[in-house]
Image (cartoon, grey):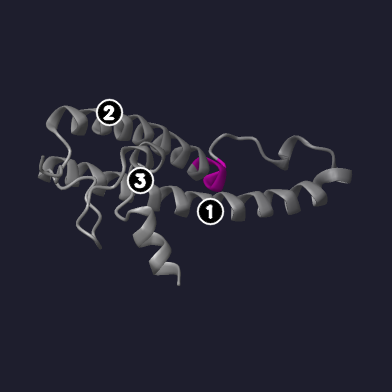
Amino acid sequence: MTEKTRYYDDELLEFKELILRKLDKAQKDYETYRSVIAQTDNNDTMDTSPTFKVLEEGAAVLSKEEAGKLAQRQQKFIQHLRAALVRIENKTYGICRETGQLIPRERLMAVPHATLSIDAKKRQRT
């Protein structure tokens, strides 16, 4: 029996549905972070007493910085998910870019945008 060299179309469809769900959630999270940065939710220090205003302004700055970092990470995650969708369309999804072997289904279910098998990833770190 020959070794499977790519995932079948029905398997690719299942991965696509998983990725689309993750992409939808990631985009919603990204918009949430952006609204924190822009303070479009009108939840700022204007309605607090002057005693706590200094503390809240410091927390707001920290919160904006954290939200900015999280937004950047989320944007990168969205790009990886979109690239995975392209690989599905090209029928190259799930193939390790280093070894050319299929990435195990379990890994793709956990990290659907993975382009390396666990072994290839470990070799990259050393």
| Distance Cα–Cα, label 3 vs label 1 | 15 Å
Q: Amino acid at mark 3?
A: Ile
Q: Residues within 10 Å of mark 3 (few under 14, many from 20)?
A: many
Q: Which mark is residue 17?
A: 2
For residue 107, which quarter of the picture? top left
Residue nearest the viewer, comparing 102 with 86 = 102
The C terminus - image quarter? bottom left
Label 1 element class: helix
Residue positioned most to the front: 1
The residue singled out by tag 1 in the image is 68
Q: Up-down: is 11 above or below 52?
A: above
The residue singled out by tag 3 in the image is 78
Residue drawn 15% across and 42% down?
4
In magenta stretch: residue 36: yes
How far across and how far down the image is residue 5, in percent? Answer: 14, 46
Residue drawn 80% across and 46% down?
53
How far across and how far down the image is residue 45, in percent? Answer: 72, 41
Label 2 element class: helix
Looking at the rendered image, the disc whose residue lies closer to the viewer, 1 or 2, is 2
How far across and how far down the image is residue 87, in percent? Answer: 18, 46
Instruction: Tell me whether the residue at label 1 lies in contact with that at label 2, contact meaning CB atoms closer than 8 angstroms.
Output: no
Looking at the rendered image, the disc whose residue lies closer to the viewer, 2 or 3, is 2
Residue drawn 36% across and 32% down?
24
Residue positioned most to the bottom: 126
Give the magenta part as a residue range: 35-39
Q: Amino acid at mark 1?
A: Gly
Residue nearest the viewer, comparing 81 with 30 = 81
Label 3 element class: helix
Q: How many marks?
A: 3
In magenta stretch: residue 40: no
